[in-house]
Amino acid sequence: MSIIGIIPARYASTRFPGKPLVKIGEKTMLQRVYEQSRKAKLLDEVIIATDDDRIADHARSFGAKAFITGHQHPSG
């Protein structure tokens, strides 16, 4: 059995739109969360689930698997 971690990363947040793409130092918040998640010994894989192509493209740029969620999924 494989254990997969899923990171929800919405662009259209009402409190902070675009939050996953905000830079913290040299990396975005999303990249930092992904890299820390990959260190978890129990996870076989980490995937980013997002509602936005900008986030998916960014995730793929640093080697993460990213999937676009459906429009019927209003939140994480």
Image: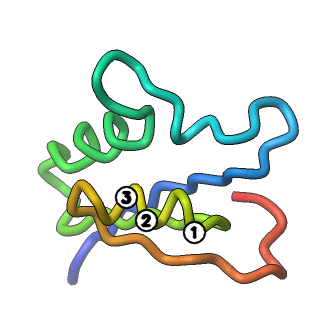
On residue 57, which mark appears?
Answer: 2
Residue depicted at 75% across the width and 31% down the height:
16
Q: Quadrant of residue 37?
A: top left
For residue 70, what is the image quadrant? bottom right
The C terminus is located in which quarter? bottom right
Q: Which residue is mark 1?
A: 53
Q: Closer to the N terminus: mark 3 or mark 1?
A: 1
Q: CA distance from mark 2 to mark 1?
A: 6 Å
Callout 1: few (<14), some (14-19), or many (20+) C-alpha neighbours within 10 Å?
few
Residue at image location 22% in from the left, 78% down from the top? 2
Secondary structure at badge 1 equals helix
The amino acid beneath tag 2 is Asp
Position of residue 1 measured from the top left corner of the image (x, y, whole percent): 21, 83
Which of the two residues, 5 or 51, is positioned nearer the viewer here? 51
Residue matched to label 3: 59
Name of the residue lying farthest toward the top: 25
Identity of the amino acid at label 3? Ala
Do the CB atoms of the residues marked 2 and 3 lie less than 8 Å apart?
Answer: yes
Q: Mark 2 or mark 3, which is nearer to you?
A: 2
> How far, Cα to Cα, is label 2 from label 3?
5 Å
Q: The residue tagged with tag 2: helix, strand or loop?
A: helix
Q: In the figure, 1 relative to 48: above or below?
A: below
Q: Position of residue 61 (x, y in %)?
A: 28, 59
Q: Residues within 10 Å of mark 3 (few under 14, many from 20)?
A: many
